[in-house]
Amino acid sequence: MIIAILLLLILIVLVYNYYVHHGRNGKLINLIPGPVGYPISGNVLDYMCSREEQWKLLITIPDKYYPILKVWCFFTPVVSIRHPDDLETILSSTKHIDKSMIYDMLLPWFGTGLLTSKGSKWHMRRKILTPTFHFNILQQFVEILIEEGEYMTRSLKNAGGTVVKDLVPFVSEHTLNAICETAMGTSLHGLGTFQLKYRNAVHRMGELLIYRLLRQWLQNNWIYSLTPKGREQAKTLKILHGFTDQIIAERKLYHEHTNGRYLKSFDNDTSIETDDADTIGIRKKRLAMLDLLIVASQKGLLTDLDIREEVDTFMFEGHDTTAIGLSFLLALLAEHKDIQDRVRSEVDTVIQESGEKFTIKSLQNLPYLDRCIKEALRLYPSVFFISRVAAEDVKLQSYLVPAGTILHLNIHGVHRDPNFWPNPEVFDPDRFLPEKIKNRHPYSYIPFSAGPRNCIGQRYALLEMKAMVAPLIHNFYLESIDCLKDLRIHADIVLRSAHPIRVKFVPIYK
């Protein structure tokens, strides 16, 4: 009886496999070149290796099958593209905006916020959140970013003498502080052990997300929840969600006590003079992204759970990706002393002209640093891929991809494509001079994605990177310890090194 059932199951699998590969969609997919897979499992076994080996596969296989390839994950095809024309076809469309199932690993933390939501919900959230990143609002946030950049520099000064830092954890501490205050209006400074507990929870959650891949194949939450990693994730999520819920409740109470005066002025100049808030002993707070969400909730557009989804999304996206980008930028500057010196000369001139104080105007007057940041994000894009689902049949350069296919948009690959970037491995900020940009394919450089679902916080991120780097370069010489060419990258949600990226900070005595 058992043997008969097994034989029946095998027959069903074989028939289904034939149907998938020889049906209309399967035939279209199999026209696309790609590595030969095994029966049933496809190419899954090729990727059953260490994350470092997975990374090597991710960057070498696309070169072999340039500019498009397909792989099979059991009965699910994935089509990888990296030619700017194909990327433009997908990213510029208002149809192919839904993320693939790989983002499901983020759902326990973010829910269906801006990053992971689909269809009408995504459109509504995007509309609500877009004003948060209006230039007038960013001007208020820049003050916080500048303060955190100076705080980071001061922490090195207080250590005394030359300091060696593992960049990612060092920078992450400060990008997390910055996004916490700009997103939630609450500084982690001065929170003592709770600050450390929350910060550790954020960082640990990022590490644990990789284990959510297990759910992609098992499709059973309860199986994952029974594993040690699942139990640890549940404990970590409790800390993260608890903190966010507490901040939301306190913030709403604050606005109740001040009769919502500061919310009414969110879109205007928010420097309100002394009013009733002072008489009842409530200190006026800086406006934060959270305040815009509270306004939306008062209009009945968002629940408290909706607000938490977006705040948690900001917290992860707004600190981790920026920290990775900053770490690679500092490492590149440490390795290229001539470029570092040129950045320092520009920063020194600007700060002297602004009275030894950074402002949003002085940050905007750093064109060479701006080019260095863009070039660092070309070589080491924090988010090195995007995964979408084709909403309908879509014609790329050479192949028709059927509706429902998972599309892997290879950002890392297009950024190093020699057809669009001469000597692509070389760090050359002058690639981004205006005369060199104008004739370049607009979709050959997409560190913040592009099109209707591009990164909503890209201007914030670029301002933060400038605010963090400028005071460091002004006060320290950077010397490399770990060469970037020797780093072993491993596959993750964002670009990560398998080993520390260390830089030596040597004080400049003036």
Image: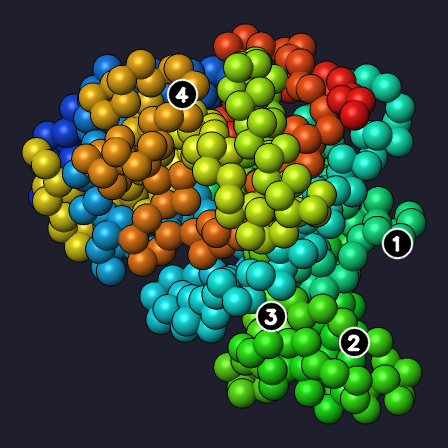
The residue type indicated by label 1 comes to: Leu
**Which residue is drawn at the image coordinates 62% and 43% (left, top)?**
353
The quarter of the displayed image where residue 209 is located: top right
The residue type indicated by label 4 comes to: Asp
**Where is residue 438 shown, x and y percent of the image?**
23, 38
Q: Are marks 2 and 1 in contact (CB under 8 Å)?
A: no
Query: Mark 3 — residue?
Result: 307
- Looking at marks 4 and 2 on the same chain, the residue that comes earlier in the sequence is marked by 2
The residue type indicated by label 2 comes to: Lys
- Looking at marks 1 and 3 on the same chain, the residue that comes earlier in the sequence is marked by 1
Distance from the alpha carbon under mark 1 to that under mark 3 = 23 Å
Secondary structure at numbered mark 3: helix
**Which residue is drawn at the image coordinates 47% and 50% (left, top)?**
458
How packed mark 4 is, by other alpha carbons closer than 10 Å (few <14, some 14-19, many 20 or more), is some
**Which residue is drawn at the image coordinates 35% and 55% (left, top)?**
453
Whether residue 382 is visible to the viewer of this picture, yes or no, is: no
Query: Mark 1 — residue?
Result: 191
Query: Mark 2 — residue?
Result: 284
**Which residue is drawn at the image coordinates 73% and 29% (left, top)?**
475
Query: Does 486 sit above or below residue 129?
Result: above
**Where is residue 393 shown, x and y percent of the image?**
13, 50
- Looking at marks 3 and 2 on the same chain, the residue that comes earlier in the sequence is marked by 2
Q: Nearer the viewer, mark 3 or mark 4?
A: 4
How packed mark 1 is, by other alpha carbons closer than 10 Å (few <14, some 14-19, many 20 or more), is few
Query: Mark 4 — residue?
Result: 428
Q: Which residue is at the front of the view, 287 or 392?
A: 287
Secondary structure at numbered mark 4: loop
Secondary structure at numbered mark 2: loop
